[in-house]
Every structure is written in structure tokens, then in C-alpha cells.
Image (spheres, grey):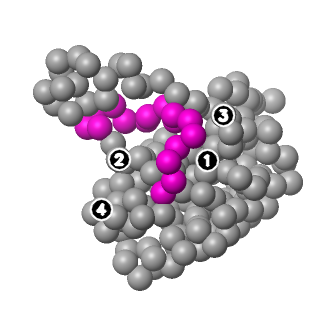
């Protein structure tokens, strides 16, 4: 571990690798700031067996909840934040789990839900959203059919398209 990572609580280089969205031309979905709506829409997009990865929660009550519903990760997701070391949670992505999380956040709002969000299945990232719930778009693998992306975007009240112009 590097001395700076040790001293300042960063993520050492040896831990920065992992799965990430590798596609050159993923779907791009306009962002939302509505966390609960996003969580409720996720099951419309993701296939059975997918995992939602939430990184960098800003609220202790959210971290506690996510710790309780998280599973041990089968793969390492590349972190989006290298300093300070982020908290990371792997939550089975089901209608029930996302609805329960949305209800929890409705009852106990979070000013800052998470910094980064990914959805993965097996060894493939299907959705990658750095700087989640800001103005940065969501990127979705083309392994997800266009009709599912369209349904997801409509549920968000958002738009989508291909990242390549033309």
C-alpha cells in the first residue's frame, strides 16, 4: 500500500482495478436527481440476477441500511473515487429491494444518496453512472435492448440515445 493512501485514507493503486463499462458506444440516458424514481425504474432495465452497486454514500442512515441489505460481492467493481476511500454496497437488484430502498428514502430522506452507481451481472457492467444524481449522464451497455432502455428512460422522465453522433 502506498504511503499516501495509508496516511490519507485513499484507495491504493492495487485496489483500483475491477469491472467497468468498457463499451465505446453505450446508450446515454439523461440524468435525474430523483433518487426514489431512479431506484423504482432500475428493475425495468436490469436482467434477473443483476446487482446494484452504490459507492460513496453521504449519510450514515443510508450507509447503515445499505450494509444491512448488501451481499458479498462476487466481483470487484472499479471504484470511481480514490480519495477518500469510499464505502461500497452490492445490493441484489429486484423490484422488492429497490422499492424497499425507495420507501426507506421517502421516510428518511438523504441529501446525498451516493457518488457513483453501477449495475452489473456476472462480470459485466450494464449501467455506469459516475457523479450520480448530478448533470452527468448514465451510460448503459448495448447488451440491454433499446426497448428496455426506452422504458427505463420514460420511467425516469428522461431521454436516451447513442453516444456516437450521426
Question: Does 18 sit left or right of 145 as displayed?
Answer: left
Task: Relative to 17, say whether 95 is above or below.
Answer: below
Q: Nearer the viewer, residue 163 or 1?
A: 1
3 or 4: tag closer to the N-terminus: 4
Marks 3 and 2: in contact by CB < 8 Å?
A: no
Label 1 crowd (10 A; few <14 / some 14-19 / many >=20)? many
- Residue 116 picture location, percent across and down: 46, 45
The residue under the point 41% across, 47% down is 88
2 or 4: tag closer to the N-terminus: 4
- What distance separates the C-alpha of mark 4 from that of mark 1? 21 Å
- Which residue carries the number 2 mark? 87
- Which residue carries the number 3 mark? 123
On-image quarter of the N terminus: top left
Label 2 crowd (10 A; few <14 / some 14-19 / many >=20)? some
The residue under the point 40% across, 59% down is 67
Q: Nearer the viewer, residue 121 or 74?
A: 74
Q: Is residue 75 magenta?
A: yes
Report the mark closest to the observer, 1 or 3: 3
Label 4 crowd (10 A; few <14 / some 14-19 / many >=20)? some
Task: Relative to 112, say whether 56 is above or below.
Answer: above
- What distance separates the C-alpha of mark 3 from that of mark 4? 29 Å
- What distance separates the C-alpha of mark 1 from that of mark 3? 11 Å
Residues drawn in magenta: 70-85
Q: Which mark is residue 59?
A: 4
- Residue 31 picture location, percent across and down: 57, 53
The residue under the point 72% across, 38% down is 141
- What distance separates the C-alpha of mark 2 from that of mark 1? 16 Å
Q: Is residue 155 magenta?
A: no
The residue under the point 81% across, 30% down is 166
- Which residue carries the number 1 mark? 119
Question: Does 118 sit left or right of 1 as displayed?
Answer: right
Amino acid at each position: 500500500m502506498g504511503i499516501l493512501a495509508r496516511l490519507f485514507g485513499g484507495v491504493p493503486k492495487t485496489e483500483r482495478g475491477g469491472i467497468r463499462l468498457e463499451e465505446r458506444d453505450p446508450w446515454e440516458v439523461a440524468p435525474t436527481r430523483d433518487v426514489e424514481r431512479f431506484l423504482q425504474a432500475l428493475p425495468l432495465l436490469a436482467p434477473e440476477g443483476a446487482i446494484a452497486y452504490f459507492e460513496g454514500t453521504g449519510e450514515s442512515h443510508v450507509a447503515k441500511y445499505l450494509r444491512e441489505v448488501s451481499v458479498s460481492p462476487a466481483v470487484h467493481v472499479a471504484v470511481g473515487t480514490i480519495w477518500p476511500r469510499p464505502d461500497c454496497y452490492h445490493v441484489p437488484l429486484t423490484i422488492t429491494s429497490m422499492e424497499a430502498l425507495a420507501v426507506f428514502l421517502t421516510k428518511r430522506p438523504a441529501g446525498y444518496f451516493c457518488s457513483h452507481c453501477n449495475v452489473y451481472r456476472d462480470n459485466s457492467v450494464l449501467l455506469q453512472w459516475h457523479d450520480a444524481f448530478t448533470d452527468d449522464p448514465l451510460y448503459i451497455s448495448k447488451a440491454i435492448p433499446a426497448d428496455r432502455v426506452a422504458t427505463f428512460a420514460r420511467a425516469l422522465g428522461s431521454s436516451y440515445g447513442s453516444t456516437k453522433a450521426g
